[in-house]
Every structure is written in structure tokens, then in C-alpha cells.
């Protein structure tokens, strides 16, 4: 008799040799949530725990072939889109996810650790805004990244209003937006979830010491996994933040650079209890 399969999540993202961000980080977070990740490589990163040195996008046809072959074979329950790599890849991914409008799509395409990609940077941001964000069930974006994105439509880029910027994107079709990294009281970080009605929830977390790589990837992947497990977005966002905070509090220094979240902290705690 065939056992019940784990929820399957198709994840588009970059291959990170450190596994702090990108699809390798997604796979770890999915597994921690009882899901099985299907990695679709959009680009290859080079770098170490200190920094990402470069990004090498894959050809769009190869991204398309990877994804469509898997989708014809397996019953996917959610999509997660991270680093897309190029405008061509944005177009390919947008066409693929549009064929599955019933599936939740968690979009986390901006990575502060990756420098702008030369003359294509502005076109890439516009392509994401026009083709992917309107299809997203949830867009996760930092306060800094949202302000930069808003410059693509604001007449006065100097005016800062994160709530208004979030509502502009929701009006374009995005269902929810999670704005992360807003400064709170001393030593606090605020994450705010918006939908068409305005603020849905506002969660405050103590800022943990040290410099971490992959916190955002952990959070967005955990949200996607919880959606695949059947949770509604507001509940998934809260539980994913709790998981991410715990993974960061157990972060490990694997190299000479930043700390890496431990997505399997719970397994180590359980093993210690049984010794």
C-alpha cells in the first residue's frame, strides 16, 4: 500500500553553495515543516558565508524545461519563487505559475546580499512588479526593498509611506504583502502583514545578536510550507516567524562569515532529550 506523500512544493531559486539562501535553504525549511521540495534552479551563486560574489543566471528555456517536466509528473500544492536571475526567467516563471492559479504562490524575489545586476537591474524589477507580483498570494519584501520598488511608480520618490506602497501592490493583484524589518523600539524588529483591508497583523520580535545569512529565505520558505499544509495566510505567517526566530536563535557559525540559521534545531533538541 502506498503511503500518503508529503505536500510537494515547487521552488524557483538560485543555487547557493553555502545553502544559506536559495533553493537549498528552501529544501531544509520545507523538510522541517514536513514537506518535500522540488528545486528549480534559476541561477548559480558564487560566494561564501561572508558574502555573495556573483550570480550566473540559467537560460530561460532550461528553467522552463525543469519546471514543466516536474509539474507533469507530480501533484504540487504550492509555489515558492525566490531569486529569479533574469528578465527572461521572470517571463518564464510568470507563464508557468499562471497555468496553476489555484495554487498559493509565495514570492520572495529580492535578496539584499546580491548586488544589482548591471544595466538589467531596473528592467528586472519592473518585470517582477508587472508579471509576478500581481499573481502572488503573498509577497515578502523588506521595508528597504519596498521603498526601492516604490520608486518605479512614485512621482516623488522621496515620500516614504510603506502602508501606501504596500496597498499599491495589493491593488495590482497581490493578495497579501508581508513587510519585514521595520524598526521598532530599541532592539526590536517589526513585520507587518497587509491585505486589501489594510493591516492584518503586526508582529514584534527581539533583534538577535550577530549577522545572519538566510533569515528571509527561511521565513518565506516556511510560509510556503505551511500554506501547502493547509494553513491560512495570517496563521502561516505567524507560525513561520516563530520557526524562523527559533532557527536564528540556534544559528551556527559554519565559516568565517555570517551565522547560518539551523532549520533542524528541533531535531537536535529531541535527540538530546532521548539520550
Image (cartoon, grey):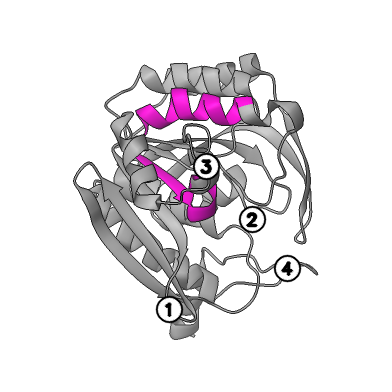
Residue where numbered disc 1 is placed: 185
Q: Percent from the top left, x then y, of residue 136?
A: 37, 33
Q: CA distance from mark 1 to mark 3?
A: 26 Å
Q: Percent from the top left, x then y, of residue 125?
A: 57, 31
The front one of 36 and 173 is: 173
Residue where numbered disc 4 is placed: 254
Q: Earlier in the sequence, mark 3 or mark 2?
A: 2
Residue where numbered disc 2 is placed: 20
- As helix, strand or loop, the secondary structure at mark 3 comes to loop
Q: CA distance from mark 4 to mark 2?
A: 10 Å
Q: Is residue 196 magenta?
A: no
Q: CA distance from mark 3 to mark 4?
A: 40 Å
Q: Is residue 134 magenta?
A: yes
Q: Percent from the top left, x then y, of residue 237?
A: 33, 56
Q: Nearer the viewer, mark 4 or mark 1?
A: 1
Residue where numbered disc 3 is placed: 157
Q: Residue at x 29, y 49 (%)?
A: 194
Residue segment shown in magenta = 123-146
Amino acid at each position: 500500500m502506498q503511503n500518503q506523500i508529503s505536500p510537494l512544493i515547487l521552488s524557483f531559486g538560485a543555487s547557493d553553495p553555502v545553502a544559506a539562501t536559495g533553493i537549498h535553504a528552501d529544501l531544509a525549511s520545507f523538510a522541517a515543516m514536513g514537506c518535500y521540495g522540488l528545486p528549480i534552479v534559476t541561477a548559480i551563486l558564487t560566494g561564501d558565508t561572508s558574502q555573495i560574489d556573483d550570480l550566473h543566471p540559467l537560460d530561460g528555456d532550461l528553467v522552463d524545461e525543469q519546471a514543466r517536466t516536474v509539474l507533469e509528473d507530480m501533484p504540487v500544492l504550492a509555489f515558492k519563487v525566490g531569486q529569479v536571475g533574469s528578465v527572461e526567467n521572470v517571463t518564464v516563471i510568470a507563464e508557468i505559475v499562471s497555468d496553476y492559479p489555484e495554487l498559493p504562490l509565495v514570492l520572495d524575489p529580492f535578496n539584499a546580499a546580491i548586488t544589482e545586476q548591471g544595466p538589467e537591474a531596473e528592467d528586472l524589477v519592473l518585470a517582477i512588479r508587472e508579471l509576478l507580483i500581481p499573481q502572488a498570494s503573498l509577497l515578502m519584501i523588506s521595508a528597504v526593498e519596498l521603498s526601492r520598488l516604490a520608486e518605479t511608480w512614485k512621482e516623488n520618490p522621496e515620500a516614504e509611506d510603506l502602508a501606501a506602497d504596500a496597498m499599491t501592490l495589493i491593488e495590482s493583484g497581490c493578495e497579501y504583502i508581508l513587510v519585514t524589518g521595520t524598526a521598532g523600539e530599541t532592539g526590536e524588529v517589526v513585520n507587518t502583514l497587509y491585505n486589501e483591508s489594510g493591516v492584518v497583523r503586526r508582529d514584534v520580535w527581539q533583534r538577535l545578536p550577530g549577522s545572519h545569512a538566510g533569515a528571509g529565505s527561511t521565513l518565506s520558505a516556511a510560509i510556503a510550507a505551511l500554506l501547502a499544509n493547509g494553513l491560512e495566510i495570517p496563521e502561516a505567517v505567524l507560525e513561520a516567524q516563530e520557526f524562523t526566530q527559533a532557527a536564528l536563535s540556534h544559528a551556527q557559525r559554519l565559516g568565517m562569515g555570517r551565522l547560518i540559521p539551523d532549520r533542524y534545531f528541533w531535531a537536535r533538541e529531541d535527540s538530546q532529550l532521548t539520550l
